[in-house]
Amino acid sequence: MMRRKLVAGNWKMNGNRAALAELNGIAAAASANPAVDVAVAVPFTLIERAAERVPGLAIGAQDVHDADKGAHTGCTSAAQVREAGAVFTIVGHSERRGDQHETSHDAWAKSAAAHRNGLTVILCCGETEAERDAGRAERVVQAQVEKSLPDDADGSWLTLAYEPRWAIGTGRTPTMDEIASIHAIARAKMRQMIGDRADGVRILYGGSVTGDNAAAILSLDNVDGALVGGASLTATKFVPIITAAAAL
Ligand code: PEP
């Protein structure tokens, strides 16, 4: 099945109003390459301004709460980010699993909350370095998918992102064979869970993707795009990844 490539940026806790100027160059590259979907997850504080500034670009959040509202000091609901102009959210990012001790069950509940409030979802999974060294990368990813993928998932609203934790922000990447192998395993696990609908779900690779390695990574089987942290912060670094995806 043909799946459109998605290149998604994650600004994490970076960026201020001045940084929004970067979105102009990113939006221009997105319209110049209509065969590729482009999205940027900005900090909560910038969602509304970003969505107003570049209406043609998919702006998203980096997390949402699993409840629709209530006494959850410091948290933000899917409905709130939707109202601010977000059209998608990341859930289960490894930095939230690590820093906020989020589990795959949390990622499952957050995916469901996002979906019922009209957001699409980038659901992250990925092993730690210790897990890979112990030969457990495949089993860890299978278990994360099993516990976090909602039963009603399909490609119209959910994208999976495989992000080995040790490759995030480190400049290190797995070998091409290792990436292809985990993506195939994730696809097979989804197929076991949701049948043929799994074929429509995009699987992004994330972890130190740059303009230099994007073409090689994005041309692998079952790699349907990239989730990009550091290299999404400027148009100069992000646009080459978009054009690499468009050239495939
Ligand atoms: C990420 O934030 O999801 C990520 C992959 O970061 P980086 O591209 O900086 O490794």
Image (tube, rainbow, N blue to C red):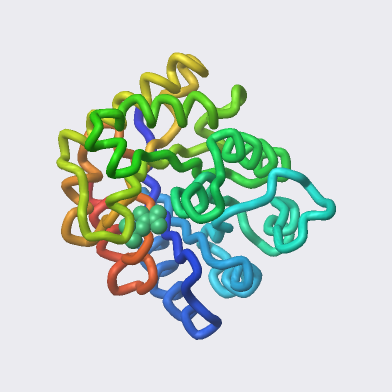
Q: Quadrant of the C terminus?
A: top left
The answer, for residue 225, to whether it is visible in the render is no
Question: Is residue 188 placed above or below 156 in the rendered structure?
Answer: above
Q: Which of these two is toward me, 82 or 63?
A: 63
- Residue 89 point in image, percent of width and height: 57, 51
Q: Quadrant of the N terminus?
A: top left
Which residue is pictured at 61% across the width and 24% down the height? Answer: 152
The outermost residue toward the right is 70
Question: Is residue 223 placed above or below 83 in the rendered structure?
Answer: above
In the rendered structure, the answer to whether residue 157 lies left or right of residue 31 reads right
- Residue 246 point in image, percent of width and height: 28, 52
The outermost residue toward the bottom is 18
In the rendered structure, the answer to whether residue 69 lies left or right of residue 195 reads right
In the rendered structure, the answer to whether residue 90 lies left or right of residue 118 reads left
Q: Which of these two is toward me, 21 or 103?
A: 103
Which residue is pictured at 77% across the width and 55% down the height? Answer: 72
- Residue 58 point in image, percent of width and height: 53, 58
Question: Is residue 76 placed above or below 133 in the rendered structure?
Answer: below
How many labels sit on residues? 0
Which residue is pictured at 54% across the width and 47% down the height? Answer: 101
Q: Which of these two is toward me, 81 or 128?
A: 128
Which residue is pictured at 72% across the width and 39% down the height? Answer: 116
- Residue 109 point in image, percent of width and height: 65, 36
Residue 187: quadrant of the picture: top left
* View quadrant of ligand 1: bottom left
Question: Is residue 79 placed above or below 176 in the rendered structure?
Answer: below
